Amino acid sequence: MSSDNTFNDSKKLMSDFNEANFQILRLHNLWDECNRLSIDGQYSKWSFKLDRIWIELYADADKSNASKYLKLLKLCNERIRLSSVDKDKLYYALMLKEEFLKKLQDDVGKGSRRSSQYSDDMML
């Protein structure tokens, strides 16, 4: 048998998008956890998960408009701090932070936006 068809597996090619895919998976998992924690009324843990989402998105936010996003994040965190004694206000403050982070995720291209190529195909 000829060895011309041997495969050299010592070289492993990685996609340029490999880390981006992993980040989107991590974000997906964090969003799922946020949903569960908010439903269960575990506001402290929900807040912590939202901070982890910020950490995932920070590098991209820093590249696009860091001062704008940092200002909005500080506003969200201050609202949460001031609302910590009233569960209804705290829920609302955490919800606003989640909305901010989802918009940020879309703004940096890791959210639900679709390219025109795919949206054109979906319209058929």
Image: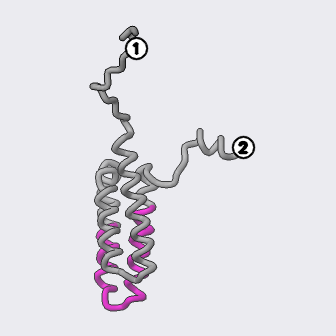
Question: Mark 2 or mark 1, which is nearer to you?
Answer: 1
Q: Is residue 41 above or below residue 73?
A: below
The amino acid beneath tag 2 is Leu
Examine the structure image and report whether residue 22 is included in the region drawn in magenta. Answer: no
Farthest-out residue, front: 1
* Furthest residue in direction right, as rendered: 124
Apparent side of residue 120 relative to residue 44 in the rendered image (left or right): right
Left or right side of 89 for 122? right
Q: Residue at x 45, y 61 (%)?
A: 103
Element carrying mark 2:
loop
Report the span colored magenta: 73-102
Real-space Cα separation, disc 2 to disc 1, in angstroms: 43 Å
Quarter of the picture holding the N terminus: top left
Q: Is residue 123 left or right of residue 113?
A: right
Quadrant location, the C terminus: top right
Crowdedness near tag 2: few (<14), some (14–19) or many (≥20) residues, C-alpha within 10 Å: few
Q: How many marks?
A: 2
Residue 124 is marked as 2
Q: Name the residue located 41 percent from the left edge and 51 percent from the top edge.
A: 108
User: What residue sits 41% from the left and 69% below the top?
Assistant: 98
Tag 1 or tag 2, which sits nearer the N-term? 1
Q: In which quadrant of the rendered view does residue 57 lie? A: bottom left
Which corner quadrant of the image does residue 102 belong to? bottom left
How far across and how far down the image is residue 19, in percent?
34, 44
What secondary structure predominates along the stretch shown in magenta? Answer: helix
Q: Residues within 10 Å of mark 1 (few under 14, many from 20)?
A: few
* Residue 5: mark: 1
